[in-house]
Image (tube, coloured by chain):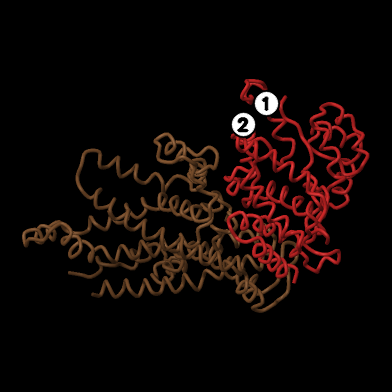
Amino acid sequence: MGDRRWLEDYRVAGKKLKAAGHPFGQTLGHTFGDAPGFWYPYLWSWGGKEVEADGKTVSLNSKETIESVKFAVGFWKDCCDEGGLAWDDSSNNRAFLSGTISSTNNGASIYLEAKKKPDSYLTEKGEPLWKDIFHTKIPKGPGGQFALPGPFTHLVMGYSKNQKAAKDFLRWVHSKPVFEQWFTSQQGYTDGATKYWEEDPVWNVDQVLLPFRDLPNVGRLVGYAGPPGRAAAEVVTKYIIVDMYAKAVQGMPAEDAVKWAHDELVKVYA
Amino acid sequence: MTFTTLATPTAYAGAPRRGPVTRLLEDERWLAMLLLLPTLALLGLFIAYPFIEGVRLSVTDAKVGVPGQFVGLQNFARIWSDDIFHVAVWNTCVYTAVATVFKLVLGLWLALLLNHHFKGKAITRAFILLPFIIPTVLSTLAWKWMFDPTFSVINWMLFRLGVIQNRINWLGDPHLALISVIIVNVWRGVPFYAISLLAGLQTISPELHEAAAIDGARAWQRFWHVTWPLLLPVTLVIVLFSVIQTFADFQLVYVLTGGGPANATQLFATYAYQLGIGTGLLSQGATISLAVFPVLLVVVIVQLLYIRKVEVH
């Protein structure tokens, strides 16, 4: 198996921080943003995947996936706030801003909120919290380093009577002068759909937000190595991958948790 | 004496004419139909139509944006072998059974207490209803705060009192999560039981209790032999309504846990929503919703037969 030292280092740091009362925080609950947002890239970082490139052959039950689950169980106990099993998408924001956790997977919203209210969110030394925050990618694992960006897609319904007007509007909204204004207002919370937007001046404003610029380069979508289609969406909304880790953390042997998830995927992809 | 003063042709000619509509409305059968029409329209639109549409969806492979084709009982076969569906069935049965027992016992106890005369009785009875009338989502959000893994006020209080050293993972532990949703359901449902049973208690004549007391019956004996048998028909009706509502519960669990952790609190309704609306698999969501129907039908029939038997007796 490949190099796992970055994950091991992350775990060592997390263990020390948890002992000091500031664990890592990650949700394992049924919440549609943060839960897949961490656990899918985590699975990929071990070389695990849901299906093969043909988009049909389920390949979740593998040595890589089982190793990822075993590591996750130890990582959870050693480093994480164990209340994370019940967190929704806002819980980690609140926990971080209140200083109860030291690291979490999230968009730039926590940092931007802390920056907006520098007198409300303080460190234990009384300093503004935003000055003590930095961003980085999810740690690299034996299988690589990945992220699950939240793609936003514009669609025009086939039954619409105003298709031309809708398409004209979308072209206008996505034209450089118009899109640029919106992109700038995001302050680095969003990436553009093309590499052009990696050169935008918004990335020169705040170095703390710079890591978000490169996320699409390590991005994958759900359903990997197949397409992010309907079956992949069903797996996400049923929280099968998330529950695989949740069941193991709650005591199910890693092999059984993976087998359960694999069997569920087989039914979905049938 | 002449008869001309009684009903002269001119008087009769001047009487108001009864048109066809008036004559129709004076017929009780037609008037009844007309008065029932709005109710039938509402029932048809909001009960019958969704039910028929649900049955239709469950025998197709319809998805959001795809009308789908007839597939027979394929969806039912699919959920029959679905592990998460099995978990949802089990959770719903446990959730309903345990919550109903607690609501009945606590509601009855509260009703017996409220049946006495005391100062502030009226205002107490009004306050008792608050958990039931506050919108469920609102009160459940408050409970979510109270059970929060980081900020739970219950944990804070127990910690300060020295009862616990480590926080209780109310919504993160699978067993505690189910207990937590049951606690919230009981808290919300006890007022319904209490007020309904109180109404039932007040129909029982105090003379019966007096007569029993004179005969030497103790409080428990008076309750078991006088109060309970007379209260049973009302109790069964209340339990019937409560079981139907609890079995189909959605908003409480959806807000509190979303069906997690790892489906530990997944119910019929939350799973049907997750599949039908979350995933867009309308046919499968409809199938799960319909799976509740035979179970509830059996519950309703059994209870109604029992109610009839008790009333006749």
Q: Is residue A86 left or right of residue A166?
A: left
Residue drawn 92% across and 37% down?
A176
Q: Are marks 2 and 1 in contact (CB under 8 Å)?
A: yes
Numbered label attached to residue A129 = 1
Figure quadrant of residue B240: bottom left
Q: Is residue B217 left or right of residue A131?
A: left
Residue B209 percent coordinates (x, y): 13, 58
Q: Does any portion of residue A94 appear in the rendered image?
A: no
- The chain under label 1 reads A
SS for dot 1 = helix
The disc, 2 or 1, on the residue closer to the chain's N-terminal end is: 2
Q: Amino acid at mark 1?
A: Leu
Numbered label attached to residue B263 = none
Furthest residue in direction bottom, as rendered: B72
Q: Classify A201 as above or below A267.
A: above
The brown chain is: B
Residue drawn 70% across and 26% down?
A130
- The chain under label 2 reads A
Residue at the spot of label 2:
A99
Residue A209 percent coordinates (x, y): 80, 32
Which quadrant holds the N terminus of chain A?
A: bottom right
Packing grade of label 2 (10 A; few <14, some 14-19, many >=20) is some
The red chain is: A
Which quadrant holds the C terminus of chain A?
A: bottom right
Mark 2 vs mark 1, CA separation in Å? 9 Å
Figure quadrant of residue A194: top right
Front residue of this view, candidates B255 and A136: A136
